[in-house]
Image (spheres, rainbow, N blue to C red):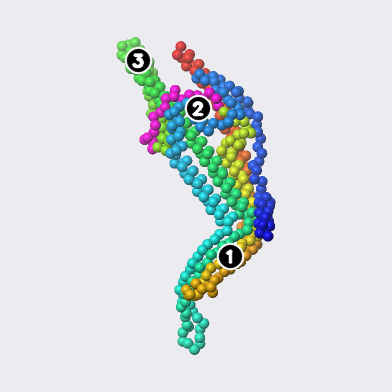
Amino acid sequence: MRTHLAALAVTLTLSGCAAFGPDRKPPRMPSPEHYSVEARPAQLPPADGVAQKLDSGARPVPEWWKAYQSDELNGLVEEGLENSPSLAAAQSTLKAAREQLRSQIGNSLLPSVDAGFSPSRQRALGIPVPELQSTPTFLYDVFAAEIQTSYTFDFFGAAFLADRALAGQIRQQTFQLEATRRALAANIVTATINAAALQEQLAATEQLVALGEQRAQQTAARYKLGSASRDEMLAAEQDAANAAATLPSLRAQVLAVRHTQAVLLGRTPDQAPEPLPLDALHLPETVPVSVASELLHQRPDILAAEAAVRATADEAGAATAALFPSLTLSASFGRGGFDWATFTSPAGKIWSVGASLTQPLFHGGALLARKRQYQATYEAAVSGYKQTVLSAFKSVADTLVSLDEDANTLVQTQRAENAARD
């Protein structure tokens, strides 16, 4: 009989979970043949001595920054991932959410058992007697010790769906943590490259300013000797001043980028690392590019949006299941008495067994409004998933176009540099 009752309870719970709530699967999204308006070539134009190759269908590289072949850069990224306060806060938040899930599962899927002991001494009013001038009072002791247990049967899956919704939210936070980790690594690499580039730009500008000052002094000396006009002298002075005027803002940019880099590494701004030389970073020869159908199962932002769809579907199902009856069984056993002798004797045994069947009838429309609320939340999560997928496709398309056009720009810049040198 117990076996049949348990099987019936499981069957009712699972059937209830299947009947309530919208579809947990995210909507199907189009899978384009190529990301951009035009298909990008597999081989990018050769620039800076490297012709980058786009490896379509390759698996993502978790530690992609190592492709720059710089031990200093690897050390900075590892330091930032280990010491970043924002990443540590996200990890602690995820840990707290997991403990919340364990607590909720323990409260909803398992019976609760409590033990209590409550001795008391009381003075109470007795029945008034007309012959007496005052109402009698009685002084007595109460000793009670009980073990109480209760369990609510989740026939329609309200608690199960609520637990699964919270588990989906934790899964969403897990993917968001991975997205935060990847974004932090990307920001550290970008700040390191920007610091190196700005430092070399600053050095080159300082050389130009020094040459401009030297030319202005020479032109002024020629003017005194009569071999240069006053207009030539003023023009040279103006050119030197204009070049020198670019230095303050450029120095501020260098320091701002270095301060940002220090904070990303978990340091104070005054402990910013020295900029790396640009020639210490090597351009990766191969760039892995996931096909559109596989991108949906690789990017953490898409996976987080998918987890949000599943979690909100379970929340909507739990809100619907809450409209149906719930059965709670309770029992207690213990000892009690008005004195210690009765409490410890066989006559002091006390127990109770009860059942409570509850069917919500009227809550001022709160339960129906809660159901509509979670249904609207689910619809918003579906729309958010679609937007996240489209944004991911756009991000990859923009990156591929930038790689191609940046290579073309670098080719023409090197052509101009060679012509200027000649």
Q: Is residue 43 above or below residue 94?
A: above
Mark 2 vs mark 3, CA separation in Å? 50 Å
Above/below status of 256 relative to 285: below
How would you rate the neighbour count of disc 1 (Cα within 10 Å): few for under 14, some for 14-19, many for 20 or more? some
Dot 2 or dot 1: first in sequence order is 2
Q: Is residue 269 left or right of residue 408?
A: left
Taking the image as shown, residue 239 lies to the left or right of residue 322, namely: left
Tell me the magenta residue range.
268-287
Which quarter of the rendering shows the N terminus? bottom right
Residue at disc 1, secondary structure: strand
Give the image quarter of residue 153.
Answer: bottom right
Where is residue 244 shown, x and y percent of the image? 38, 24
Q: Residue furthest bottom?
A: 131
- What type is the residue that disc 2 sits on? Ala
**Element on which disc 2 rests:** helix
Q: Amino acid at mark 3?
A: Thr
Front-most of residues 415 and 292: 292
Residue 61 included in the magenta stretch of the image:
no
Task: Identify which residue is drawn at 51% across, 30% down.
Answer: 64
Q: Which residue is mark 2?
A: 67
Q: Secondary structure at mark 3?
A: helix
Q: 313 or 7, which is in the foreground?
A: 7
User: Reading the chain from its start, which is encountered first: label 2 or label 3?
Assistant: 2
Residue under label 1: 331
User: Residue 356 at what x, y percent from top left?
Assistant: 62, 64
Residue position marked by numbered label 3 in the rendering:
219
The answer to whether marks 2 and 3 mark residues whose Cβ atoms lie closer than 8 Å is no
- Closest to the camera, between mark 2 and mark 1, is 1
| Outermost residue, top side | 227
In the image, residue 295 sits, relative to residue 328, either above or below, namely: above
